[in-house]
Image (cartoon, rainbow, N blue to C red):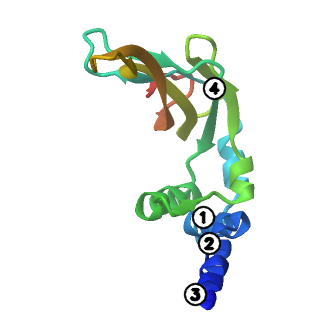
Amino acid sequence: MKHLFFISIVFCFLNCNPIKNADRLAEKNKKTIIYPEFNFSTEVAKKQLEKGDGLIKGLLYKSTNKLSVTGAKSFGRGIKVDLYPVTDYFMAWYQLREKKENKKTVVYLSDEAYAMRLETYTDDYGRFEFKEMKPGKYFLQAFMSTSKTYSRDVVVGTNSYGTQFYQKENYNVVDHHRVEKFVEISKSGDIIEVKLN
């Protein structure tokens, strides 16, 4: 009987060890990172990002209530928007991401490709601009969060007759979004308007 007690104590200690639990959780949630098997050309990307006289104007938002009549929107305020030149390497990355990315696998650009981008930030109304763009195809990407507030009735007590008393409790649900879109400037001087949603 003593041996069984000792074994159960050791087993409990091994299972209750917070470091081992953290290690198990980290291994369970481990992500695989993959990169495109394609050579990135810095020269091609730099050439596409040279100054021109085109303009990309955009609006960043997410619909927060699709069932409402007005279609409530949450505008991305102060959100970074990245612009990537669409090269052969970039398309290889995008296609690989479409095929392979899931909860356990992430597809990254190489450090050199990631460095070849332009950045801007949205204003208080979700508007952004990329000025002096030359004709070509570009990829816009932004990450933003939206929050919705809900309420529910929670039992806060009962009286001596068994009647339950309720109180409203508010809670928030936060959603994270990766918002992306391809845009193309066809000719010099074009002004492209885009809704990034």
Crowd class of label 1 (few under 14; some 14 to 19; many from 20; radius 10 Å): few
Report the side of 42 relative to 26 (left or right): right
Report the side of 90 relative to 173 (left or right): right
Residue wearing tag 3: 4
Say which of marks 2 and 3 sits in front. 3
- Of 129 and 17, nearer the camera is 17
Q: Amino acid at mark 3?
A: Leu
4 or 3: tag closer to the N-terminus: 3
Crowd class of label 4 (few under 14; some 14 to 19; many from 20; radius 10 Å): many
Asked if the residue at tag 1 contacts the one at tag 4, i.e. Cβ–Cβ closer than 8 Å, the answer is no
Is residue 70 visible in the rendered image? The answer is yes
2 or 3: tag closer to the N-terminus: 3
Q: How far apart are the alpha carbons under marks 1 and 2?
A: 13 Å
Where, quadrant-wise, is the C terminus in this rendering? top left
Crowd class of label 3 (few under 14; some 14 to 19; many from 20; radius 10 Å): few
Q: Amino acid at mark 1?
A: Leu
Crowd class of label 2 (few under 14; some 14 to 19; many from 20; radius 10 Å): few
